Each structure stands twice: as C-alpha cells, then as structure tokens.
Image (cartoon, helix red, strand yellow):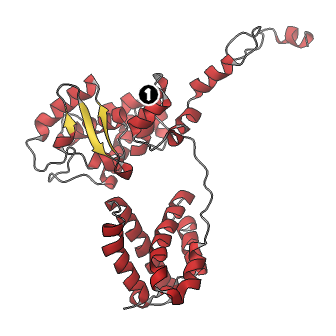
Amino acid sequence: MTALATSLQTYFTTFARTQRDLSANTISSYRDTWRMLLKHLSTTLGTPVDALDLEDLTAANVTAFLEHLQHERGNNAKTRNTRLTAIRSVLARALPDHPEHAATITQVLAIPPRRTTRPVIEFLTPAETQALLNAPDQQTWTGHRDHALLLMAVQTGLRVSEITSLTYDDIHLGSGPHIACTGKGRRQRITPLTKTTVTTMTNYLTERRSRLGNALFCGPHGQQLSRDALERRLARHVSTATTTCPSIGAKHVTMHTLRHTAAMNLLAAGVDVSVIALWLGHADTHSTAAYLHADMATKQAALDRTRPPDVTPGTYQPAPDLLAWLTAL
C-alpha cells in the first residue's frame, strides 16, 4: 500500500471522524474531491489509481486538476477553492508522518485560493413566489408534498440539507408553532411558522402519516429526498409557473433562491439584519449584509435621506416641455 493510500485511510477513518468530528456533508465533499483528483491524475499520468503516491501530488499536478475543474467541468472559483481545501486538509495531516515528501506537500499547501466575486443575490418577487407555490398539482400526493415543501422553504429560509433532514419530531404545530433543525456548523435553531404554513402543514401531515418512513418530506418509499430530487422537482414547477408569471422564467431559480427570498421578505418587512442572521442560522451578520446590497428600496431610502432640503424627494423627472427646459439651461 502506498503512502498516499495509507494517508487517505487514516484521514477518513480516524482523523476526520474521531479527532476532528467533521460533519457527514464535509466528509462526503472531501471524499468526492479526492475521488475526482485520483481519477484525473490516473488519466493524465497514465498511472493506475492504486499506484499513485504522494510524489505524484506535485503543485503542478494539483493546479492542473483545479484548472480542469474550473475550465472543463464549469466549476466556479468558490467550488474550486472548496476542492483545494479538501486536498490541503488531507495533506496537512499526512505531512508529519511522511517527512520524505515534505517538499512536495509544502508546495501544494502553498497554492493560493482563487479570488472570488460575490454575485448579486437573486430572489423571487411576491408575484413570482405565489406563481411558484400554485404550480404543483395539489390533487396528487407529490403535488401536495411539493407545495408544502416549497412553502416551508420560502417562509423559513431553510437550507436544502436542512429541509431534507427534517423528521416528524422537528415540526411543532401546537402552541408557538415552529420548526427545529440542526444547520451548518451544527448550529441548532428554531424558526417560527406562520398561520398559512401551519394550516398547509397540518393538512399535509394528515396524508403524510399514512406513508412509510419518518422523513417530513419523503420520496415514494418513505426515504429522505435527495438534493438532486428537490432541484428537479423545483425546475419542473418553475417551468409550470412561467406560464402564468413569465418573469420567473428569466431567473435561475434553485432551492437556495427560496432561502434568499425568505431573507428579502424579512428585510422588506423591516426586520433588523441581526434578527435575519439568527433566522437563517448565520454565524454573524457579515453573510446577511449581502441582502442589503440586493435591496434597492433600502438604497433608495438612504438616498432620500441625503438629499438637500430644497430638492423634491423621489426619482428625477424632466420637465414635459423639452424646448423650455433647454432654453432655461
């Protein structure tokens, strides 16, 4: 067994789970990164995967892999950096055990992450949101489930992983109705539910309890829905909603777009950014501040506060008589 194989086994069987106690999602992400890296190295170097060793993980080879991800697989800079973090994590753990490969490993650890740009947040307007919620055929079981799931996502702003992991025990529809979940970074939070959501979930659970499994939103055999399954169902409903609300068809709508929509609805209602951060499960308000940049109403209000006293509030409108206006210049 090569030193690389030993290092990978030690990391994923002992270090990641026992010492670092990484989450299942993080371990899966790191695992997938190394699977892609080993396949790429095997193809480019002409070496069987089982024969690859630490000496093959040069900075040049790792950089070529990262470029492959970005230019051939279409990964953005953020995903590229996430893959680099996974590679660094394993090699940093292997470095003390294999000093003979210290020069090679150190060069890989020194690869800088790619600078990223924060895109403008995309969210749905109230009309687009309503069109999407109306899209599922509620005469069917899957349509009833999808409507409840989409409403839950838009109202609570839960992440995809948080929605798929929900069970019966996480929802409370009695006094003080709320949904409880364990989110990113193992942060537990409770999100209140509106009367509309409570009514929808009550009707949904009446039908859901007759089916197998404990997942709140389940597949045909009672199992948890996967991220891909949710995105496919969402894409279908977005296509249906386009017939009544064409503007939604021009947007790239994902499950995370619904999370953005929930945040923007709270911001439009005048909720403080710190409260929105708690609502979404952010570690601090730095991530939540991005919603302020996307809210044009907030920017317009700030602009109106800075206007001189003798200037009429609002957007400038030219005088109707163009010739008179030109003469007065």
Q: Amino acid at mark 1?
A: Leu
In-image side of 319 versus 244 (left or right): right
> Closer to the camera, 129 or 105?
105
In-image side of 257 versus 164 (left or right): right
Across and down, in percent, residue 5 comes to 38, 84
Across and down, in percent, residue 64 comes to 58, 76
Can you tell which quarter of the image residue 127 is in?
top left
Residue 267 shows up from this direction: yes
Number of numbered discs visible in the structure rendering: 1
Identified at 18% across, 54% down, the residue is: 223
- In the picture shown, does residue 253 fall above or below 116? above
- In the picture shown, does residue 290 fall above or below 175? below
Residue 74 shows up from this direction: no
Name the quarter where the N terminus is drawn: bottom left
Across and down, in percent, residue 277 comes to 44, 37
Can you tell which quarter of the image residue 25 is in?
bottom left
Q: Secondary structure at mark 1?
A: helix
Name the quarter where the C terminus is drawn: top right
Residue closest to the far left: 210
Across and down, in percent, residue 212 comes to 10, 49
- Residue placed under numbered mark 1 in the picture: 266
Identified at 32% across, 74% down, the residue is: 14
- In the picture shown, does residue 34 fall above or below 98? above
- In the picture shown, does residue 42 fall above or below 303? below
> Closer to the camera, 166 or 97?
97
In-image side of 38 versus 210 (left or right): right
Q: Bin the neighbour count of mark 1 within 10 Å (Cα to Cα): few under 14, some 14-19, many 20 and up.
A: some
Identified at 92% across, 10% down, the residue is: 327
> Closer to the camera, 212 or 172?
172
